[in-house]
Image: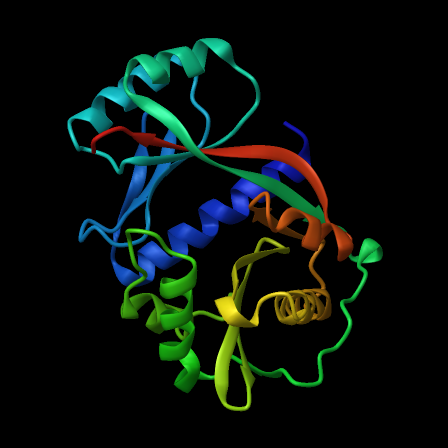
Amino acid sequence: MPEERKDIIRNLKDFYSEVAKICRYDSGRFGGLDYVWNKSGNWPGYMIGKPNLEQAGIVSDEISRHGLPPFWIMDNEKDAELIALLDKKGIRAVRRWSGMVLNPEDYKPAAETGKLKLNINKAGDLPDWLSLVNTELMSGTQIGDEVGDAFTQSNNFRWLTGYVADVHVASGLLYSSENIAGIYMIVTKGEHRGKGFGSYLTSQLIDYAIEMGVDRIVLHATPLGEGVYRKLGFKAVNDISIFWKLGY
């Protein structure tokens, strides 16, 4: 697998693993794959990695016994045999992300929006950050207050909150590990979308990452967000699928 693709998965694993460690969620390896699992039912609950066929059968059976989390994130290289096996086990792709990479020399900053006031790593803003992410981004599961507390306990996290006339309208997160920075949970409040707030907030996170001297910045984008990130200089390097055990 090319190094850029590895960086995307590696940063994602490190992000989930550090949150799990600080919050004391269940985490470890099974069948050669990493997992993190908040057994309360809230975020996160993922397997991460692409198995061989033998591993896939073992892991699928353990998921069916509710011994592992129900969601499975993997680099979506075309593998008909693997997809057929997962389908037979009742595990289907329910979401797709584009894995995207930005090298600092390719960065194209977004235009500043004078109305948006940004705060970085302000602990008093964490309730606003969590509320907006849970309301606008999460479906079904929620991010618990303990995750916000975790951000304050590690220098690897940078969180941004954006306000217009004291109304919280945008949030985002930067996580750095092994000289790679990952951008996560970019969200804009519904009625404030289309005004450039999300692009500008993302641009500010990129600025922080470059100031830190990272080798590259990575993220995973929904189909709707991919065009926005391309304008900032990101390029898509792989597809990432999220599989779910039906009826879990």
- Judged left or right of residue 191, residue 218 is right
Name the residue rendered at 26%, 38% in the picture.
Answer: 69
Percent from the top left, x then y, of residue 1? 63, 27
Q: Is residue 196 visible?
A: yes
Look at the image and tell me in which quarter the C terminus lies: top left
Percent from the top left, x then y, of residue 25? 25, 53
Name the residue rendered at 43%, 14% in the picture.
Answer: 82
Closest to the observer, 74 or 156: 74
| Image quadrant assignment for residue 148 | bottom left
Residue furthest right as drawn: 105
Name the residue rendered at 68%, 31% in the picture.
Answer: 2
Closest to the observer, 180 or 56: 56
Residue furthest bottom as drawn: 165
Closest to the observer, 9 or 45: 45
Residue furthest left as drawn: 65
Name the residue rendered at 66%, 71% in the picture.
Answer: 195
Q: Is 95 rendered above or below residue 88?
A: below
- Judged left or right of residue 27, residue 115 is right
Q: How many marks?
A: 0
Q: Is 145 rendered above or below residue 90?
A: below
